[in-house]
Image (tube, rainbow, N blue to C red):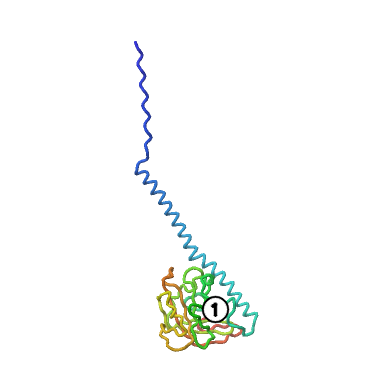
Amino acid sequence: MPEPEPTPAPAPRPRRKGSARGRIAVAVGVFGELLITAGLVLALFVVYSLWWTNVLADREAKREGDKVRESWTADRGPGNLDTKDGIGFLHVPSMSEGDVLVKKGTDPKELNQGIAGYYTKPVKSGMPQDQSGNFSLAAHRDGHGAKFHDIDKIEKGDAIVFETKNTWFVYKVYATLPQTSKYNVDVLDPVPEESGKKDDGRYITLTTCTPVFTSKYRYVVWGELERTEDVDDKRTPPEELR
């Protein structure tokens, strides 16, 4: 009796490729991980831009400010107002920023040091000791010290005080401009007519970017000199700063 033939082995089943749904799931997962990573990178960048640059700028500004005050103490003579390290300190109680070192120029590299700068172009700033003119300043509103961050808290009638080696210059705010073109240089004119003034005077102008976190427009505050006070041996501040 013949032996039965062996049952042939089943043919190997072809390897199944992943389904379309599985491939989509994998792609979505990878994309989600990329979004999370991008979000973390963006968050770190924001922390760096809005916090760490402030820390670095404040350190540098304090170091530079201390250097100026030490030079004032070492030299009791009248000296020149303009120095390579800074010409004095801006005090604006409404902004609660303490004393802000003011140096020549508005180059971002300088302003990044946590200071304010007076304009040399496109309109040359007047100086506080001039008998007439517009002492015009700029500073960052966010990051790099953000010395003018709270400029929108300044109101008409508020005090702006500029401290030099020998003199306190006390200004009173008389007008604000919450938004104007960043190309509007008329706000820096010796007689800032856009603020409502028509005659020569001793003015101060503060400018910074607006809205917050952008540089699309400019925010402007104008003040006019009310009086000056000589600096005494104790550097007693004017009553507006007490």
* Residue at image coords 36%, 26%: 10
Where does residue 172 sit, x and y in percent of width and height?
A: 46, 84
Above or below 17: residue 173? below
Location of residue 21 by image quarter: top left
Q: Is residue 175 visible?
A: yes
Q: Quadrant of residue 57?
A: bottom right
What's the residue at 59%, 76% (across, down)? 85
Identified at 52% across, 88% down, the residue is: 131
Above or below, 173 against 39 in this view is below
Relative side of 6 to 200, left or right: left
According to the picture, the residue beneath numbered tag 1 turns out to be 89
- How far across and down, in percent of the image, does residue 46 sit? 46, 63
What quarter of the picture does the N terminus occupy? top left
Amino acid at pointer 1: Phe
Of residues 189 and 3, the one drawn nearer to the viewer in this rendering: 189
Q: Secondary structure at mark 1?
A: strand
| Residue 86 placement (x, y as % from top left) | 57, 77
Q: Residue at x 47, y 74 (%)?
A: 148
